[in-house]
């Protein structure tokens, strides 16, 4: 049986994309901060409709962005750090959308 060839990096794999392998933390801070600012602005605008849901949504978005800052300062390997950034930003998006959707459902009932 022939020896197995070492695996090569496949540039089409999601985990091999430049955003997860080479991007510096400042880009994640910039886009994460922009997304957080827009999300917080929308949730603050909806504060008059459902204050509790909006405040919980704002708190989650702010805490997840703060977690991005902590990850950037504590995790050194770029691949691991960028993967954590991606998960945190995705979770931030889900939290914001869930808060807005919850407000929408409550208001339409």
Image (cartoon, rainbow, N blue to C red):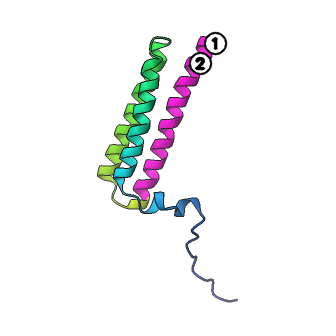
| Percent x, y of residue 34 | 40, 38
Is there a contact, CB below 8 Å, between mark 2 and mark 1?
A: yes
| Percent x, y of residue 107 | 59, 12
Which residue position holds label 2? 104
Mark 2 is surrounded, within 10 Å at the Cα level, by few (under 14), some (14 to 19) or many (20 or more) other residues, namely: some
Query: Quarter of the image holding residue 22?
Result: bottom left
Looking at the picture, does residue 69 appear above or below residue 105?
below
Element assignment for label 1? helix
Task: Give yes or no for residue 103 being in the magenta stretch.
Answer: yes
Looking at the picture, does residue 83 appear above or below residue 38?
below
The label shown at residue 19 is: none
- Which part of the image, by quadrant, shows the N terminus? bottom right
Query: Quarter of the image holding residue 48?
Result: top left
Which residue position holds label 1? 108
In the image, farthest residue toward the left = 73
Q: Nearer the viewer, residue 26 or 88?
A: 26
Q: Residue at x 45, y 62 (%)?
A: 21
Looking at the picture, does residue 18 appear above or below residue 106?
below
Which stretch did the figure color magenta? Answer: 80-109
Q: Residue at x 34, y 38 (%)?
A: 66
Query: Quarter of the image holding residue 64?
Result: top left
Query: Magenta residues: mostly which secondary structure?
Result: helix
Res 89 seen here: yes
Q: In this view, does 55 lie to the left or right of 107?
A: left
| Percent x, y of residue 65 | 38, 38
Task: Give yes or no for residue 93 being in the magenta stretch.
Answer: yes
Q: Residue at x 63, y 83 (%)?
A: 4
Mark 1 is surrounded, within 10 Å at the Cα level, by few (under 14), some (14 to 19) or many (20 or more) other residues, namely: few
Element assignment for label 2? helix
Q: In this view, does 62 lie to the left or right of 5?
A: left
């Amino acid at each position: 049986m022939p020896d197995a060839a070492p695996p090569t990096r496949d540039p089409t794999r999601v985990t091999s994309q430049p955003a997860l392998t080479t991007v510096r933390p400042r880009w994640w801070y910039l886009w994460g901060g922009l997304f957080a600012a827009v999300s917080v602005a929308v949730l603050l605008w909806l504060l008059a409709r459902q204050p509790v849901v909006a405040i919980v949504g704002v708190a989650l978005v702010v805490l997840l962005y703060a977690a991005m800052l902590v990850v950037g300062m504590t995790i050194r390997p770029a691949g691991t750090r960028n993967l954590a950034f991606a998960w945190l930003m995705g979770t931030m998006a889900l939290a914001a959308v869930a808060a807005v959707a919850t407000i929408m459902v409550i208001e339409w009932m």
